[in-house]
Amino acid sequence: MFPFLLSLARWGAAHSERNAELWVVGDGLARGSLRALSLPPNVSVRWVGNVSYEELPGLYAQAGILAFPTLSDEWGVVVNEAMSAGLPVLGSVYSQAVEELVVDGVTGWRFRPDQPSEMDAALEQALSARLDTLEAMREAGRLRVKDLTPDGVKDRILEAVRYVCR
């Protein structure tokens, strides 16, 4: 999260005429040092903290983009959930969910969080996207994950087993 906040701070410094708000959902040991980071006045962070699973849809409904800057993650289910809710994803390629589901410029933007210039470029694209582009990405994301239901996954596994057994 720290590299992402630094990238957001650089974006804010370069775009003093625009505003950005980041909601951080969850908690962790680094929260204190993250909160102490100095940000430009046009960048604000809302520290939501831990929320129940039932509260997540309400948060997704208020968001514009999901940022998922993980340095390592097997499968971030939050990516599926956000796309189902119609959010484009600004995500790290170190998440298998981002690798599998996010198509650059179609359902979101991908970046390596350990490459500051790459993260800065993806953040710039996300925060400069036109409203019609974001709307098209919302629909593309919903379509991308529509079959990722328990039954849909079961059907894909059965299909793979049948193929191997031929």
Image: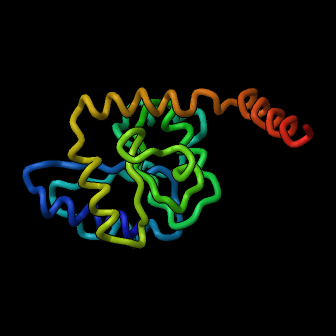
Location of residue 66 by image quarter: top left
Using residue 26 as the reference point, say whether residue 8 is left or right of it.
Answer: left
Q: Where residue 15 sits in the image (x, y, percent)?
A: 12, 56
Q: Of residues 36 and 21, which is closer to you in this image? A: 21
In the picture, the quarter occupied by the C terminus is top right
Q: Please give the name of the residue rendered at 42% of the width and 30% of the height, measured from the top-left corner.
A: 61
The residue at the far front in this view is 166
Rendered location of residue 52, percent (x, y): 59, 40
Tell me if residue 67 comes above or below residue 161 in the rendering: below
Colour pattern: rainbow
Q: Quadrant of the N terminus?
A: bottom left
Residue visible at 51% across and 67% down in the picture: 71
User: Count of labels shown?
Assistant: 0
- The structure residue drawn at horizontal position 18% and vertical position 59%, both measured from the top left corner, is 12
**Residue at the outermost left position:** 17
Image position of 101 (left or right of 153): left
- Image height check: is 70 above or below 133? below
Residue 138, quarter of picture: top left
Residue 10 horizontal/vertical position (percent): 21, 66
Instruction: Tell me: residue 82, above or below residue 46.
Output: above
Q: Residue at x 52, y 69 (%)?
A: 29
Direction from residue 47 to residue 20 in the image, left or right? left
